[in-house]
Image (tube, grey):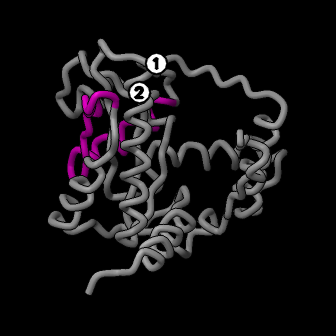
């Protein structure tokens, strides 16, 4: 039985509203057939001239565990390689939102602002993928630029919404791009592919207090202007 238009809208609204960044995952792996279907649907994302510039490497099992072991040590030793500049300099309302997000996350774990060691420990969980059993690394051919990177962003949103629809969770991570050379080496990827970011995903661990965080959004009039 096909859904009515209003039922489709309602389902879509639920998916959009339920998608959020999750930072604690169960040790369960996704069935390979389900995994394939998720990425088939994500592939329906739009792109300029239908170029589909995203190069996606979905990592599980032994290769993922190798990265999970190596990334934290790599970061601590200062062995950071980034394909694209990362210089976030937020100001005004953007800085306010950044601080609010951090405060909410650390508050959910009862970590005070002054507890630098505990905050650093939470940050390092980025490099163990928050316990996720799957990570998608999103690359871009090195001769492409900003406009094609935007296409990869649209693909990423498609992927995360699809994961939500299948009852799974995800977290996009700029931090994973800090190890571009290592990821290429472990996955045997050519240097012509440049790493934009990664997405850890799987089944949410609802018992992890970090997942109690619920980030809000600004009022529509803060970001959107209707010209009528």
Q: Is residue 74 visible?
A: no
Q: CA distance from mark 1 to mark 2?
A: 11 Å
The picture places residue 68, in percent across and down from the top left corner, at 36, 45
Q: Which mark is residue 149?
A: 2
- In the figure, is residue 167 to the left or right of 99? left
Q: Secondary structure at mark 1?
A: loop
Q: Secondary structure at mark 2?
A: helix
Residue most extreme to the bottom: 1
Q: Which residues are magenta?
A: 48-75
Image: 100 above or below 24: above
Quadrant that contains the C terminus: top right
Q: Which mark is residue 84?
A: 1
Crowd rating for badge 2 (residues with CA inside 10 Å; few <14, some 14–19, many 20+): some
For the point 36% across and 52% down, the residue is 159
- In the figure, is residue 44 to the left or right of 104? left
For the point 23% across and 32% down, the residue is 186
Quadrant that contains the N terminus: bottom left
The picture places residue 150, in percent across and down from the top left corner, at 44, 30
Tell whether position 71 is magenta.
yes
Image: 70 above or below 218: above
Kindly report which numbered mark, 1 or 2, lies closer to the viewer in this rendering. Answer: 2
């Amino acid at each position: 039985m096909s859904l009515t238009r209003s039922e489709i809208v309602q389902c879509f609204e639920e998916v959009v509203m339920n998608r959020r960044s999750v930072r604690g995952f169960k040790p369960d792996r996704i069935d390979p057939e389900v995994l394939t279907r998720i990425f088939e649907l994500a592939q329906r994302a739009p792109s300029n001239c239908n170029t589909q510039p995203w190069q996606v490497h979905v990592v599980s099992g032994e290769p993922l565990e190798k990265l999970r072991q190596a990334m934290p040590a790599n970061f601590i030793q200062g062995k950071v390689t980034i394909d694209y500049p990362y210089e976030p300099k937020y100001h005004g309302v953007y800085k306010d939102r950044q601080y609010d997000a951090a405060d909410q996350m650390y508050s959910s774990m009862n970590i005070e602002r002054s507890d630098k060691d505990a905050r650093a420990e939470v940050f390092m969980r980025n490099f163990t993928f928050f316990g996720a059993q799957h990570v998608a690394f999103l690359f871009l051919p090195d001769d492409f630029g900003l406009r094609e990177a935007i296409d990869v962003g649209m693909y990423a949103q498609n992927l995360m919404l699809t994961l939500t629809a299948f009852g799974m969770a995800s977290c996009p991570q700029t931090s994973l791009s800090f190890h571009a050379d290592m990821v290429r080496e472990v996955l045997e990827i050519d240097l012509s592919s440049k790493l934009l970011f990664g997405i850890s995903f799987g089944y949410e661990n609802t018992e992890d207090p970090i997942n109690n965080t619920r980030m809000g959004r600004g009022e529509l009039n803060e970001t959107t202007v209707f010209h009528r």
